[in-house]
Image (cartoon, rainbow, N blue to C red):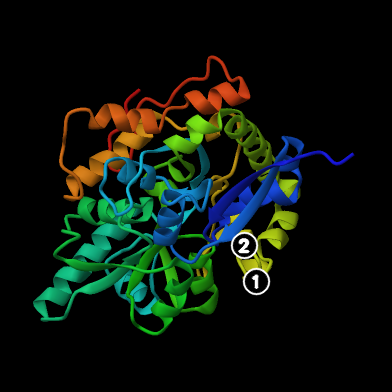
Amino acid sequence: METYLTPVIAGFIPLLDSAVLIAAREKGFAAREGIELKLFRETSWANIRDRIAVGQFDVAHMLAPMPIAASLHLTSLAVPMLAPMVLGLGGNAITVAADLWQAMTLHDADREGDPASTGRALARLIETRKAKGQGRLRFAVVHPFSGHAYELRYWLAAAGLDPDADVEISVLAPQLMPDALASGQLDGYCVGEPWNTAAVKAGTGRIATYKQAIWPDSPEKVLGVTRNWAEAHPVTLSALLRAMSAAADWCAEQKNVRDLARLLARPDYLACPEEICLPALQGEMRFGQRTEKFIPDFLTLSGGAKAAPSPAQGLWFYDQMLRWGQAKAAAGHRDEVSEIFSPALYRSALQLDGVKERRMARLFDMPVVE
């Protein structure tokens, strides 16, 4: 007799941190929890946002700030959402054109990606360009409400630059960024892997700094779900969270890295060479043609307590929305954001008790407090 599996439709963007959804389906973790996980690849985050809002997706691989933007009606087709699980920590980098990097080294840019050093070098270079009457540099991010946008802006602002006046920031799909850099349409971008490595391997780009150096152990993607769907399907959501936590643990095992890279590289998933998936999964990042750095936590795919969201994470994103004029402070917003990033659903599904919650976000330019 056939076992009935509850269908769950999920959207994803072809990035390394879609690995948890892909492994949950392909390695049987979803089926073991009674779920038939149906995955649909999308080309843009706007499509992900719209399709989950109108009910074509039940859940989605989603930029961590997007459920906040949707819930606070900061974006089109806004619906109340939750982020019950973190799908990956870290995984982004800021890549600049090879010739721009060479110019930054003349201003003492750190070759291993220290964000303070590379930011200062870029700021000095921009001042030199201004004095010569040269135009603004153009950077790209994947979406206005994204970790990429806020990390890029934070890095620039920490160096004394005004992200809205001193550079141009545009939106572009992740997989198009390496080609846009190579053709000279971009001077740099902030994106998730493997699209930084793609530019490095092509010799057209150089990694200037990376997410784990800017905001250590910070969420990049989450499982996004509408409140309506979560309330209507609590048993299914709990089962899905258990399946995805188990899949994340499988992804985190180094013995599975090559198997995972082969899986992600398939035409129906990332559709890319297997070898550009490996550096971030192994923590063996190549910043440029002659600079390699071992960063074991460059991208963390893990279940258990690490995948639990925390209100502090959501509130940092909300504060960036306020800082950059995307939102206006209103009564109840901070409580709502805290609820969106509440770990309660995840902890309940996995029966995690007594897990210490992250209390604050600490970025590279903040003093260390014992």
Q: Quadrant of residue 182?
A: bottom left
Vertical order, 254 against 289 (above or below)? above
Q: Which mark, by number, is residue 168? A: none
Q: Which mark, by number, is residue 273? A: 1
- Name the residue furthest top: 354
Query: What is the spatial separation of the Cα atoms under label 2 and label 1, in whole angstroms?
Result: 7 Å
Numbered-mark total? 2
Dividing the image into 4 quarters, which one contains the N terminus?
top right
The amino acid type, in three-letter code, at marker 1 is Pro
Q: Are marks 2 and 1 in contact (CB under 8 Å)?
A: yes
User: x and y percent of residue 277 in the render?
Assistant: 62, 62
For label 2, the residue is 277
Vertical order, 18 against 314 (above or below)? below
Q: Which secondary structure, mark 2?
A: loop
User: x and y percent of residue 123 in the render?
Assistant: 21, 63
User: x and y percent of residue 63 in the render?
Assistant: 42, 50
